[in-house]
Image: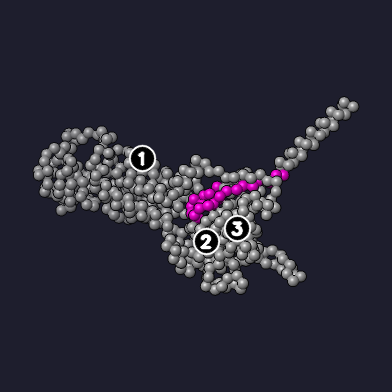
Amino acid sequence: MKAIKIILLLISIHVSATAQTNDTIQRKIVWTFDLNRQIDALAVRIVSKNISSAEEQKADYIIMQLNTYGGELAAADSIRTKILNCKIPILVFINNQAASAGALISIACDSIYMHSGGSIGAATVVDQTGAVLPDKYQSFMRSMMRATAEAHGKKTVVKNGNAIEIWHRNPQIAQAMVDPSIYIEGIIEEGKVLTFTTQEAIKNGYCEGEAENISEVLQKANITDCQIIEYESTITDGIINFLLNPIVQGILILLMFGGIYFELQTPGVGFPLCAAIFGAILYFSPLYIEGLAENWEIIVFIIGVILLLVEIFVIPGWGIAGISGIILVIVGLTMSMIDNNVFRYENEFDISVIVKPLALVVTSILASGIGIMYFGKKILSSRILNISLHTELNADEGFVSVETDEKSFVGIVCTTITPLNPSGKVMIENEVYTAIAGHGFIEKGETVIITRFETGQLYCEKK
């Protein structure tokens, strides 16, 4: 009898362990994250990272909590594409607003749940001032909204005793969220852009149910016995998000160009060049990690910098190399900010997605130029960049120190023996002196006149 009891106990333990193992195996994994922000490059990164993480965790469902008033069209299209291509069912919980770009993102999801008092719609494309953009942009948005709704296919319903097929999300309704000229009987009048409340969205097939929190979303979606994994941002995420901020990107561009300029003016110091390289690394690294900057864009930028250096040191003067270098630098910096998958307009390139990045790059370069012109001479004449200059210029090498008064040099006419860009060398009475061009670039062999002498430095102008 004792042996029988032991056997029964072992069987009971085995059955219990098997049941627990099966329970663990059958338990569904639900990955959740928040997207409560403007739709921009950072929003694209958040969605991409969470989809990748959910796939790594082999999640059964993804729930995105959304609250946004819209944002950039290119970023919204990128998010829409990632959601449509995701093999894991994505549910969106609109806990307040899904306006404009938010409506496009919501429609891309497999299921939509809305908080009471929420809304979805108003997807007309506008500029930063709120003015409606030309019909080309509205047409692009209409086509995206329509195609996104159609991507969910049709479903069979019984109406008047007959089985008929209808769209899961009516594409005409999706278009009406963009175009005020669309009229749908009983839904929207002509001349108004469509926006649904929670109950209106449920009535018209653009919401699966009303919920107050994630628990109710799971209940309405019939997802039971699940393990919820909430996304938690890391320190690395914070750093990358910081570096992707447009203001920070503009500062890094300033650092790159400022560093290159001051290194050229004080060769051998090294610090300005290191600062420029550091700025380039911080600029391109997060964009490359996030899949925005591609190899060819970084190569284009490097080639542009090389052409600029060739123009300065090998073939002075603003020629083909210099102009080409400037263009390639701008192209490399601009294109690295853009997701190439959304750089389109239906079957053509969509120039609109390049406007903001291009404006940021050009503005930063112009600001860098203005800053260099204003602060350049002050910095060069200070001790900031001279602390590490240890090279001695000896008299037997043709260099003479300038230790005399201003009057003995001002007005002297001499010849440049190297290009002045803006600093270089001039010959005065068979002696070599360092001089700085007061304005612009002066080529080798030009006749110049010394205009002033300050802090041991000659300044000259082309005669």
- Please state which of residues 397 and 349 is positioned toward the viewer in this rendering: 349
Q: Read off the residue under disc 2.
A: 100
Residue 293 percent across, percent down from the top left: 47, 50
User: Whole-Å distance between the Cαs marked 3 and 1?
Assistant: 55 Å
Residue type at the position of mark 3:
Ser
On the picture, is 20 further left or further right than 395? right
Instruction: Give the residue pinned by disc 1.
Output: 274
Q: Which residue is mark 3?
A: 116
Disc 2, SS:
loop
Residue 319, image x and y in percent?
A: 30, 55
Depth order, front residue of 212/152: 212
Can residue 85 be seen by looking at this rendering? no
Position in image of residue 431 (x %, y %): 14, 40
Residue at image position (45%, 51%) is 336
Looking at the image, how many numbered discs can be counted on the residues?
A: 3
Judged by depth in the image, the label closer to the viewer, 3 or 2, is: 3
Say which residue appears at 49% left-offset and 64% top-offset: 125
Q: Residue type at mark 2? A: Ser
Q: CA distance from mark 2 to mark 1?
A: 43 Å
Location of the N terminus (image quadrant) = top right
Q: Does residue 339 appear to the left or right of 370 in the view shown? A: right
- The disc, 3 or 2, on the residue closer to the chain's N-terminal end is 2
User: Foreground mark, 2 or 1?
Assistant: 2
- Above or below: residue 117 compared with residue 272: below
- Give the mark toward the camera: 3 or 1: 3
Q: Residues within 10 Å of mark 3 (few under 14, many from 20)?
A: some
Residue sitting at x 26%, y 49%: 374
Range covered by the magenta-colored residues? 26-49
Within the image, what quadrant is residue 175 found in?
bottom right
